[in-house]
Image (cartoon, helix red, strand yellow):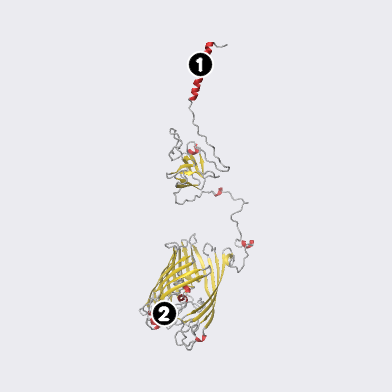
């Protein structure tokens, strides 16, 4: 059944009206803005992908690298405010490319850069909302809105901090960072696999495993490879070592010295002067054997126990041109041959206390032992018998010595210890203290107190050649005894490139008989010496100054000429200096010498090794320059130029009975 014509005529306009209304309604539906499509980042295989964008602009950060720099701006060239250490967890509230803004514990904010393209990035980023909001208990305020947020958008809730948000461990620039040592439960660490190699393998005898493997074949007379005889391996047990040292010391010396003619006769019957011919020569051969048995690992700490024995065999030949220069009997001629066996060291050293974890120690040493009182041997250097306590503190910065020694008489022609003679009645008490790195690193300061008591009152003591040594043929030639105390301060080291050494000593005491006044006399004398040097590549240039006071009046009851106990000065060229090396005689002034061999003081002693100290002497002053040339590792050329004066010549005038 069809509609009436009139109905069909109205139906078309109504359908058109409805269709147009529907199209208008669709056109008015608000469009949801779409984010612009961007190309997906291209990530190479094996590399880390960049983190996704966060919905609310907040990100959870956890540091994976050992350190991550926090910059003031989102550029790599900006200043670094702090460093985050591995394991730190925090929150970022803004992102610019690969840069994330964080807030430090001190209230500052900074930027960290996510390094893309590494298998293990420097920090992990979580863009999920649940991580960004954190956990309850936050003390942080709401972060600033993201840069791309709409102005009328609702603000996101304030982030809630994780419990360890504050553990950032950042440090200001310029201050060292402290390493984080994580807590480790040993029970949770799995044991190593038995199939994997271990870092340490127990060896029953680690000292001789090299021999068992055939790597090194030990030879007894090979000192350049591992050898039991030089302490490389224990001789028994695990920490008992033996050290054998053999030294051949050969000396030949030709010289010309002022030599007096013999008192009874002369080699030249036509001579009528008191000065004779002065050519002399000496040959000396010493074989030194050092035997040491010690307990302990001496690589990093002092030995716990040591036994030392050092014998010396000597052979010497001397030639002169005048009789009575070598022996008291002129019939002995002008040539002397002698030999001697001596014991220079024989002691036990026991470490009775370890004072710190740095192996500071306290030791006691008993027996015949070497000792030097200062850095350069200005006052006392000998091999006496005695008891010595010594040790260190504060990682060896403090060192001390407390000792008593009794001097051993010497063999006349070799200057070695003669244990066949009674000990001398000459006691030395020593107390000194060293401080390393005083004022500046590399300089050591020393304070010294030494007391010398001499009770040698025998009527006459003759040396091996028949000459009288004690008392000296000096003044009234009567025995005497004395007590003297030395107070000293010494320093040795360097200030920058300048090497320095210096010593000051004051001697005070009492002599019970002055050889000139025949009365007791007070001792008051002083001594100062210093040397400065500087290295220029293989050349060392040095300058030296020395002054020892002299006695201005031998009859006034005061002895003001300085004398040492037994000196061996390493100054002003030492034994390359003529004055120091040679014993210069005082001709026509008694049986004494101006200076002893290897001595710088004008002491007027009968013998430096066997005689008594003499504080009635002219003293000496010295100024010198010198240079050392290390032309090769084995060859050194030494040059010296020294100017000397006597501090006061009154004593010399009295002895020689002549004016100035």
Whether 286 is drawn above or below 49: the answer is below
From the top left corner, tell me how far across and down residue 551 is, in percent: 38, 77
Find residue 427 and report its image quarter. Answer: bottom left
Quadrant of the snapshot with the C terminus: bottom left
Marks 1/2 in contact by CB < 8 Å: the verdict is no
Pick whichever, 593 or 532, lies toward us: 532
Identify the residue position indicated by label 1 in the image: 13
N-term-proximal mark, 1 vs 2? 1
From the top left corner, tell me how far across and down residue 489 is, in percent: 41, 68
Pick whichever, 351 or 652, lies toward us: 652
For the residues carrying marks 1 and 2, which lies nearer the camera in this image? 1
Q: Is residue 158 visible?
A: yes
Identify the residue position indicated by label 2 in the image: 480
Q: Residue at x 63, y 65 (%)?
A: 217
- Specify few, some or many for label 2: CA neighbours under 10 Å numbering under 14, 14-19, or 20 or more: many
Whether 16 is drawn above or below 491: the answer is above
Tally of numbered tags = 2
Pick whichever, 353 or 520, lies toward us: 520
Element under label 1? Answer: helix
- Specify few, some or many for label 1: CA neighbours under 10 Å numbering under 14, 14-19, or 20 or more: few
Q: Is residue 471 visible?
A: no
**Marking on residue 227:** none
Residue lying furthest left in this view? 556
Whether 239 is drawn above or below 483: the answer is above
Residue 234 horizontal side relative to residue 402, left or right:
right
From the top left corner, tell me how far across and down residue 517 is, in percent: 37, 81
Pick whichever, 405 or 469, lies toward us: 469
Quadrant of the snapshot with the N terminus: top right
Give how far apart the Cα atoms at labels 1 and 2 are: 156 Å
From the top left corner, tell me how far across and down residue 205 is, in percent: 61, 61
Residue lying furthest bottom in this view? 270
């Amino acid at each position: 059944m069809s509609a009436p014509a009139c109905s069909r005529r109205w139906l078309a306009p109504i359908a058109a009206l409805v269709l147009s209304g529907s199209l208008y309604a669709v056109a008015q539906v608000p469009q949801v803005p779409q984010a612009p499509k961007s190309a997906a980042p291209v990530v190479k295989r094996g590399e880390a992908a960049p983190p996704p964008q966060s919905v609310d602009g907040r990100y959870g950060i956890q540091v994976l690298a050992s350190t991550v720099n926090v910059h003031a701006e989102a550029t790599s060239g900006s200043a670094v405010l702090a460093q985050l250490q591995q394991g730190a967890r925090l929150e970022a509230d803004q992102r610019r490319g690969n840069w994330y803004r964080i807030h430090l514990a001190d209230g500052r904010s900074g930027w960290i850069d996510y390094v893309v393209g590494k298998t293990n990035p420097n920090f992990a980023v979580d863009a999920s909302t649940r991580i960004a909001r954190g956990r309850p208990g936050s003390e942080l305020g709401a972060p600033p809105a993201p840069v791309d947020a709409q102005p009328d958008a609702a603000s996101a809730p304030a982030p809630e901090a994780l419990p360890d948000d504050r553990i950032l461990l950042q440090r200001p620039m310029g201050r060292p960072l402290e390493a984080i040592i994580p807590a480790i439960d040993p029970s949770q660490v799995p044991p190593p696999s038995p199939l994997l190699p271990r870092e340490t393998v127990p060896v029953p005898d680690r000292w001789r495993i090299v021999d068992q493997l055939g790597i090194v074949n030990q030879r007894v007379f090979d000192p350049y490879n591992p050898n039991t005889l030089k302490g490389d391996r224990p001789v028994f047990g695990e920490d008992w070592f033996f050290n054998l040292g053999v030294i051949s010391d050969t000396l030949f010396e030709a010289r010309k010295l002022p030599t007096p003619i013999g008192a009874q006769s002369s080699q030249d019957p036509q001579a009528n002067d008191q000065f004779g011919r002065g050519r002399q020569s000496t040959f000396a051969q010493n074989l030194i054997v050092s035997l040491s048995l010690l307990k302990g690992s001496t690589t990093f700490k002092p030995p716990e126990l040591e036994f030392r024995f050092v014998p010396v065999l000597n052979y010497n030949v001397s030639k002169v041109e005048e009789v009575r220069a070598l022996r008291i009997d002129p019939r002995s001629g002008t040539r002397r041959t002698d030999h001697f066996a001596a014991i220079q060291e024989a002691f036990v050293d026991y470490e009775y206390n370890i004072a710190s974890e740095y192996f500071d120690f306290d030791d006691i040493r008993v027996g015949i032992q070497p000792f030097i009182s200062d850095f350069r041997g200005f006052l006392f250097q000998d091999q006496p018998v005695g008891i010595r306590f010594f040790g260190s503190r504060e990682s060896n910065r403090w060192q001390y010595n407390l000792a008593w020694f009794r001097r051993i008489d010497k063999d006349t022609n070799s200057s070695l210890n003669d244990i066949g003679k009674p000990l001398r009645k000459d006691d030395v008490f020593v107390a000194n203290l060293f401080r390393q790195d005083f004022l500046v690193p590399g300089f050591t300061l020393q304070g010294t107190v030494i007391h010398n008591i001499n009770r040698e009152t025998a009527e006459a003591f003759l040396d091996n050649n028949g000459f009288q040594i004690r008392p000296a043929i000096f003044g009234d030639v009567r025995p005497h005894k004395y007590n003297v105390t030395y107070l000293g301060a010494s320093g040795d080291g360097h200030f920058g490139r300048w090497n320095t050494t210096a010593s000051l000593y004051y001697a005070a005491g009492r002599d019970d008989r002055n050889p000139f006044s025949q009365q007791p006399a007070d001792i008051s004398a002083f001594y100062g010496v210093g040397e400065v040097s500087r290295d220029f590549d293989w050349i060392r240039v040095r300058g030296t100054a020395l002054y020892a006071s002299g006695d201005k009046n031998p009859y006034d009851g005061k002895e003001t000429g300085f004398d040492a106990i037994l000196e061996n000065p390493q100054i002003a060229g030492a034994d390359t200096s003529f004055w120091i090396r040679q014993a210069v005689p005082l001709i026509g002034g008694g049986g004494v010498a101006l200076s002893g061999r290897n001595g710088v003081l004008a002491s007027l002693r009968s013998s430096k090794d066997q005689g008594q100290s003499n504080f009635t002497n002219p003293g000496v002053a010295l100024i010198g320059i010198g240079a050392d040339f290390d032309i090769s590792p084995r060859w050194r050329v030494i040059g010296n130029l020294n100017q000397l004066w006597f501090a006061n010549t009154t004593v010399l005038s009295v002895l020689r009975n002549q004016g100035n």
